[in-house]
Image (cartoon, grey):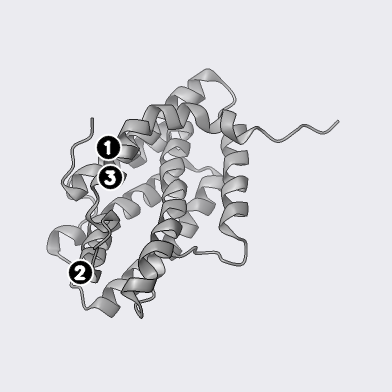
Amino acid sequence: MTSNPPDIAHVLRPLRAATHTLHETLDSRLPIARDDASLAEYADHLRALRPWLQAVRDALVASGVPGLERSARRTDRRLAALALDLDDLGAPTACSERDNTSDGLGPRLAEEAAREPAFAWGLAYVLEGSQLGGMAMHKRLAPRLAPHPMRYFQPVDAACGLAAQWKDFVAQLGAALADPAAVDAARRGAVAGFRSLMPRFGLQGL
């Protein structure tokens, strides 16, 4: 007997509900989201994002879950694309950015992810979802900011296709959140993902 794949809306509903206000606040206040965003603001965006990406990537690895380790490998490729973009822009790395754990973010997330893998699935939801937002951002900004390739906002695995990648991730997420305790931990992970990201852009989590 074969089981039907989980309904995407059903899987995502609790995470979307938990993070809706945080997500809306972040998206509406990012300088890179403005219609007149410049390459300098793109560089600022990448510099602010890099420590968070590294911390979340390390937390996914700490979870020990194979599906999350695949997300971590994709994040390695995103970090490489980010570094190339900053190099193209001649954007130096600030001292405070080099130390990804200077504020304790990396160890805190990794400890929680190792203790509760479902928490790490919530972090991964924020991380994987950000690539969908990045694709929309690239479509909007790339024509005006050309010829810079804006690699970070492009899918890291174009051969697979971002839609298929997201569908596969949601299927794994649905399998991982099989009970209320796991759903609750994933909600906390998703909220932690947004709340740890927002201060890097001068925003406070709600």
Q: Is residue 9 visible?
A: yes
Residue type at mark 2 is Ala
- Residue 3 image position (x, y, % from top left): 77, 31
Quarter of the view holding residue 134: bottom left
The residue identified by callout 2 is 40
The kind of secondary structure element at disc 2 is helix
The quarter of the displayed image where residue 104 is located:
top left
| Residue 80 % position (x, y) | 39, 68
Q: Residues within 10 Å of mark 3 (few under 14, many from 20)?
A: few
Q: Is residue 203 above or below residue 143?
A: above
Q: CA distance from mark 2 to mark 3?
A: 19 Å
**Quadrant (top left, top right, bottom left, bottom right) of the C terminus:** top left
User: Which label lies toward us, 2 or 3?
Assistant: 3
Q: What residue does disc 1 label?
A: 195
Q: On the image, numbered disc 3 is attached to which residue?
A: 28
The quarter holding residue 4 reads top right
- N-terminal-most mark, 2 or 1: 2
